[in-house]
């Protein structure tokens, strides 16, 4: 078998293993607001380590540079040492898809 094909098959296997165990997060179509939904999640789960997330502008900076969605939704490496509920992940995903407004 061609070496490139073997490599491709191995990489597909590795990437599907890597995604295993993480929830695929999708927005359920609901409209979510920073004030009613997101701030309380961040205050409870993030601010103890990330003091800069106590304000909207602090959170928005991480949303804008892409690290927020990557850590919380894609890789689910944050919050460090704990886990958000599926319901909270869905709320955050919807809010991000809606442009992460200060609403
Ligand atoms: C127990 C402490 C702790 C908690 C709670 C925590 N983080 Fe973090 N976070 C860290 C540390 C330490 C780093 C840097 C090292 C690393 O990436 O592992 C980090 C890195 C990050 C990064 C990468 C960019 C950066 O600023 O370095 C993002 C984005 C992030 N955290 C978001 C969050 C969000 C959102 C939450 C809440 C849902 C959260 N974190 C909860 C400790 C924490």
Image (cartoon, rainbow, N blue to C red):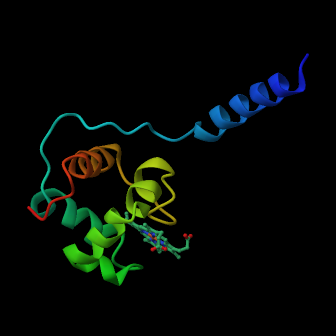
Is residue 54 among the parts visible in the rendering?
yes
Spot occupied by residue 67 in the image (x, y as percentages of width and height): 43, 63
Displayed quadrant of residue 64:
bottom left
3 and 77: which one is in front?
A: 3
Quadrant position of the C terminus in the picture: bottom left
**Quick one: which residue is furthest to the bottom in this view?**
51
State the residue at coordinates (82%, 30%).
7
State the residue at coordinates (18%, 48%).
98
Horizontal placement of 24 versus 17: left or right? Answer: left
Horizontal placement of 27 versus 71: left or right? Answer: left
Spot occupied by residue 23 in the image (x, y as percentages of width and height): 45, 39
Displayed quadrant of residue 21:
top right
**Quick one: which residue is furthest to the top in this view?**
1
Quadrant position of the N terminus in the picture: top right
Spot occupied by residue 4 in the image (x, y as percentages of width and height): 83, 27
Is residue 83 among the parts visible in the rendering?
no
29 and 40: which one is in front?
A: 29
């Amino acid at each position: 078998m061609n070496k490139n094909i073997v490599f491709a098959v191995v990489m597909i296997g590795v990437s599907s293993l890597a995604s295993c165990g993480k929830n695929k997060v999708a927005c359920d179509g609901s409209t979510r607001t920073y004030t009613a939904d997101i701030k309380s999640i961040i205050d409870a789960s993030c601010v103890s380590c990330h003091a800069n997330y106590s304000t909207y502008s602090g959170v928005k900076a991480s949303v804008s540079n892409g690290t927020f969605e990557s850590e919380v939704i894609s890789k689910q490496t944050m919050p460090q040492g704990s886990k958000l509920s599926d319901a909270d992940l869905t709320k955050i995903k919807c809010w991000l898809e809606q442009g992460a407004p200060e609403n």
